[in-house]
Image: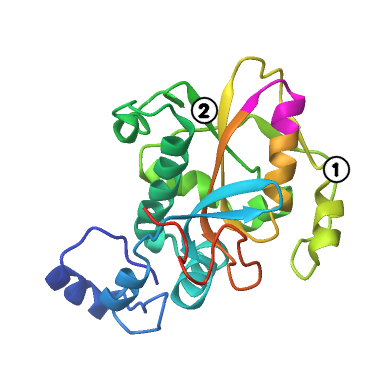
Amino acid sequence: MTIPGGFSAPLLDALAVVLPTTCAGCGRPDRGICTGCRFALGPRVHVVARGELAVWSALEYADVARRVIAAYKDGGRVDVASVLATALRSAVVAALAASIPTGVEGFDATVSGSDDRALGVRVATIPSSSAAWRQRGFSPVGLLLAREGIVSSRVLRQRGKRADQVGLGLVERSRNKQGSLVARGRLDGQDFLIVDDILTTGATMLEAKRAILAGGGRVVGLATLAETRRRHPSPLHSQETGPQML
């Protein structure tokens, strides 16, 4: 079973007696996320490139992060949402900061709020497929954003059926995503920050950007929770300097 976050250690110890759980990152008993795995999920925000795209990401999709994200998305472990939401917010803030003029203050505070705009920028997420929605019952990215008070805009929708991206190569992923998203209406004069969970080849982000541009909108930035750096090293980095960090 899962235990909600936000409880003190003594209370978690008591709850573990009647609601047994294990750490989603390492399997340690009695904790949804143990101290060590929580530390491993601390955001290390960096910008990476996928072709023409520059994407701000908080984590590397490997080891603890990979296991926890998989448990959250496909294992129903919504009890880990709080720690993942903190990481995603850091990438969103970094992407927004990179998109605004030098000297604009308060962008961190304006990310949250009842409005879906921050400094005139709307946050757009990738819509889940019907099958994924039926299986999970929630939007993984939308839930994480909501945990941080960030309202996402449902400006995109799926069009047609596409094969699962898992197992597809770079070219196949790109072809599979072409034309798969469309704007729900005209987006003229509106600025968007596109947010997704995992960056792999960048095909999904590229398609989302294309759909928003086709609808008349502008894309000012891209952010993800994690990126598969080992499979897709960024040309923006070098062995000498390492990744750009915030």
Residue 23 image position (x, y, % from top left): 37, 77
Residue 214 lies in the magenta-colored region: yes
Q: Is residue 149 above or below residue 225?
A: above
Q: Position of residue 222 (x, y in %)?
A: 56, 43
Q: Residue at x 85, y 60 (%)?
A: 171
The residue lying at 39 percent from left, 63 percent from top is 80
Q: Earlier in the sequence, mark 1 or mark 2?
A: 2
Identify the residue at image location x=66%, y=19%: 187
Looking at the rendering, the stretch of residues picked out in magenta corresponds to: 211-218
* Residue 138 visible, this orientation: no
Compared across the picture, whether 132 is left or right of 56 comes to right
Residue 76 in the image, given as x and y percentages of width and height? 50, 64
Please state which amino acid type lies under the numbered disc 1.
Gly
Give yes or no for residue 47 being in the magenta stretch: no
Q: Measure how far apart labels 1 and 2 are at the Cα level.
A: 25 Å
Local crowd size for mark 1, using a 10 Å CA cut-off: few (<14), some (14–19), many (≥20): few
Which mark, residue 122? 2
Q: Which residue is mark 1?
A: 160
